Image (cartoon, rainbow, N blue to C red):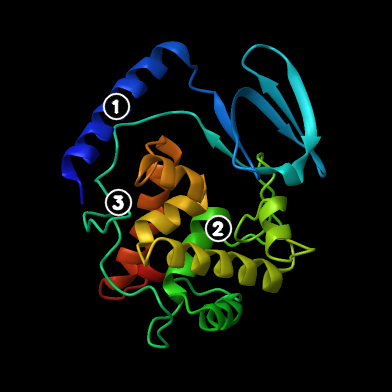
C-alpha cells in the first residue's frame, strides 16, 4: 500500500472539507446518476416515477427516477480510518469472512429471518451482515419509502431494483434477495472488505473507488459504524438486549 499517497489524500480531503464548510450549506446533496456522473444540488423531490433536482445555481430539472443511482448528503467529515482497496485492516468491521456460514444467523428475531437465511445462503453472504444492513436501512419495515425514493426492507432505489431484476420492491423476498445479491457483488468487488462493501451500498462503488477507501461523507461514515455496531453487538455474549 502506498502510505504517502493515502496520507496525501487524507490531507486533501481535510482541506476540501474546510472549503465546503464555507461554500456549501449543510442541506446540500449530491445526486449520483446511473451513468457514473454526479451533480451537486440544493434540494430534491422524489415522486413515484420521477425526481426533481434543484441546482445550486437555482435551476431545476426533472428526470426519470431510474436514472438516479442515489442521493447522498454533501457533508464532509475528517476521513475515517484508512480502509483501502489495497488491504488495510484498520476498519470498523470485525475481521472475518463475510461468506455464508450456517452457524451465523440473522441478528434480530423477525418474521423475515427465513428469507434472509435463504438469500444469504444463495448468494454466499454472512446472514448477520444482511440483517444488520436491513436494520440500518429500514428497521425491518417492508413498505417504507425514504424521502430519497429508496424502497422496502433493503431500501432499493428504482435503478438498483431494475439492475437486479426486481419489479416490486415491496415484495420482501424479491427485495431481500436483490439487496443480498448486491452485497455479494460489492464484497466481490472489494475483495471481502466489509467496510468498503457497506460504504458502497450507501454511497455507491464509484465513490469508494474515487476516494480509494470509505468516502468522507458524514452520512456514509455514520452508516458503516451503525451497521458494524449491530454486527459487533451480535458477537457479544447473548442477552435479551442484544436481540431487541
Q: Quadrant of residue 36?
A: top right
Which residue has dot 1 on it?
12
Which residue has dot 2 on it?
139
For mark 1, give the secondary structure.
helix
Q: Quadrant of residue 13?
A: top left
**Mark 1 to mark 3 CA distance (whole Å):** 16 Å
Q: Residue at x 66, y 19 (%)?
A: 55
The answer to which of marks 1 and 3 sits earlier in the sequence is: 1
In this orientation, which residue lies closer to the viewer: 200 or 138?
Answer: 200
Q: Residue at x 68, y 12 (%)?
A: 58
Look at the image and tell me in which quarter the C terminus lies: bottom left
Q: Residues within 10 Å of mark 2 (few under 14, many from 20)?
A: some
**Mark 1 to mark 2 CA distance (whole Å):** 36 Å
Q: Residues within 10 Å of mark 1 (few under 14, many from 20)?
A: few
Which residue has dot 3 on it?
84
**Looking at the image, is 182 positioned above or below residue 48?**
below
**Looking at the image, is 208 positioned above or below residue 75?**
below
**Looking at the image, is 17 positioned above or below residue 94?**
above
The answer to which of marks 1 and 2 sits earlier in the sequence is: 1
Identify the mark at residue 93; answer none if there is no mark. Answer: none
Q: Residue at x 36, y 68 (%)?
A: 242
Residue 61 placement (x, y as % from top left): 77, 24
The answer to which of marks 2 and 3 sits earlier in the sequence is: 3
Q: How many numbered marks have been drawn onto this rendered protein structure?
A: 3
Q: Residue at x 35, y 62 (%)?
A: 193
Q: From the image, state whether disc 2 or disc 3 is nearer to you.
A: 3
Amino acid at each position: 500500500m502506498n502510505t504517502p499517497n493515502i496520507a496525501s489524500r487524507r490531507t486533501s480531503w481535510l482541506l476540501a472539507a474546510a472549503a465546503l464548510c464555507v461554500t456549501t450549506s449543510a442541506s446540500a446533496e449530491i445526486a449520483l446518476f446511473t451513468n457514473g456522473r454526479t451533480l451537486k444540488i440544493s434540494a430534491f423531490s422524489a415522486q413515484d416515477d420521477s425526481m426533481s433536482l434543484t441546482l445550486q445555481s437555482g435551476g431545476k430539472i426533472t428526470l426519470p427516477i431510474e436514472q438516479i443511482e442515489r442521493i447522498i448528503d454533501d457533508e464532509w467529515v475528517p476521513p475515517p480510518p484508512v480502509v483501502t482497496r489495497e488491504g488495510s485492516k484498520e476498519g470498523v468491521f470485525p475481521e472475518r469472512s463475510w461468506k455464508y456460514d450456517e452457524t451465523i444467523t440473522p441478528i434480530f428475531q423477525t418474521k423475515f429471518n427465513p428469507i434472509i437465511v435463504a438469500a444469504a445462503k444463495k448468494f454466499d453472504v454472512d446472514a448477520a451482515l444482511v440483517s444488520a444492513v436491513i436494520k440500518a436501512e429500514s428497521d425491518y419495515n417492508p413498505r417504507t419509502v425514504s424521502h430519497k425514493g429508496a424502497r422496502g426492507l433493503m431500501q432499493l432505489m428504482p435503478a438498483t431494483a431494475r439492475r437486479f431484476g426486481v419489479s416490486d420492491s415491496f415484495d420482501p423476498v424479491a427485495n431481500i434477495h436483490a439487496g443480498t445479491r448486491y452485497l455479494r457483488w460489492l464484497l466481490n468487488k472489494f475483495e471481502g472488505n466489509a467496510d468498503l462493501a457497506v460504504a458502497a451500498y450507501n454511497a455507491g462503488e464509484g465513490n469508494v473507488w474515487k476516494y480509494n477507501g470509505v468516502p468522507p461523507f458524514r452520512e456514509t461514515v455514520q452508516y458503516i459504524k451503525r451497521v458494524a455496531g449491530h454486527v459487533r453487538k451480535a458477537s457479544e455474549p447473548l442477552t435479551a438486549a442484544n436481540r431487541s
